[in-house]
Amino acid sequence: MSWADCALPLVLLWPACALAQQAPTPYAPSPYAQQPWAGAEMPVSCAVRASREVKVAPPVSGVIETVEVRPGQQVAAGDVLVRFDAALGRAELALAEARAADASARDSAATRVAALQVRLARLERALKSRAISESEVETARLDLDSARGDLARAEAELHLAALEADRVRLGVERSVVRSPVAGTVAEALIDPGEAPDAQQPIATITVTDPLRVEAYVPAAEVPAFIAASDFRARIGGAEHGLDFDYAAPLADVSSSTISVFFTLQAPGLLPGLDCVIVAPSRVTGE
């Protein structure tokens, strides 16, 4: 038997040995899934965020005259943020209000209608005694109908003038921009003298009451996590109670986690802080 005949079985057996050494290890569940959910701190990190950011759009076009707030300032809903230059708008409003208040054309038309009604009644009495012809009465009736048309047009023009005054007044009122929500003024704040377009926000208001907490929970543990109760977060050395809001419908593929969101009532805290979820207690049935 040659050396090659002895070596051939070894060569055939070698790939089988290599495949046996490279066989994948069986799946082992996360050790955290086997740990109790109460009485110990879970390795679930979280972040404190603002509940929302409101970008205040310019309600009118024009140049910013004054800015009444500064970045970092707390504002309530209805507080003045900026004022547009409304000098031209105020002048237009004065003119529109004067036109709306001028009822002379309507009053003159109403007076003419009243006079023609009296004249027609007199002519109709005269016609009965055959003191005048039928054509004179018809002419008087046509004159009255024309006067009534003039009165209707005058009343319509007065109504339109009032509507125009309301439109201009609304534009002047909207030149004073107020915060739609309570919160904190962010850094992106317009300056006096700027003329923002429709795409440029005047200010950004960060709403921090309530705050929003986003927890990054391992995807396999989300059902048990959500089934728990009494959620708390350790933020800056202190624990704060959380109210469950919702869980994201999709997992983050890169970290294999699902974001679970809570609301947090803590006026003294600011968004941007890191935190850790404290193990909640399980929900137990009766």
Image (tube, rainbow, N blue to C red):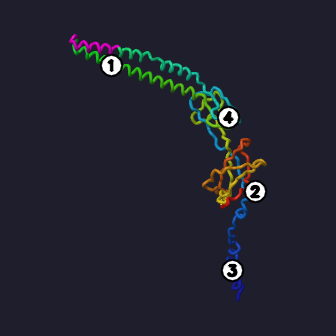
| Residue at 41% over, 16% down | 107
Residue type pointed to by label 4 = Val
Q: In this view, does 41 lie above or below 90?
A: below
Q: Quarter of the image holding residue 216?
A: bottom right
Q: Is residue 227 above or below residue 120?
A: below
Residue type pointed to by label 3 = Leu
User: Do the residues under discs 1 and 3 have CB atoms within 8 angstroms?
Assistant: no
- Looking at the rendered structure, which numbered label has been put on residue 41? 2
User: Do the residues under discs 1 and 2 have CB atoms within 8 angstroms?
Assistant: no
**Please, which residue is most extreme toward the right here?**
237
Distance, label 4 to label 2, CA atoms, is: 37 Å
Q: Would you name the residue on which mark 4 appears?
A: 75
Q: Would you name the residue on which mark 1 appears?
A: 146
Residue type pointed to by label 2 = Glu
Secondary structure, mark 2, is: loop
Distance, label 3 to label 2, CA atoms, is: 51 Å
Secondary structure, mark 1, is: helix
Q: Quarter of the image holding residue 229?
A: bottom right
Q: Which comes before the other along the chain, label 4 or label 2? A: 2
Q: Which of marks 3 and 4 is in front?
A: 4
Q: Would you name the residue on which mark 3 appears?
A: 13
| In the image, residue 123 lies in the stretch drawn in magenta | yes
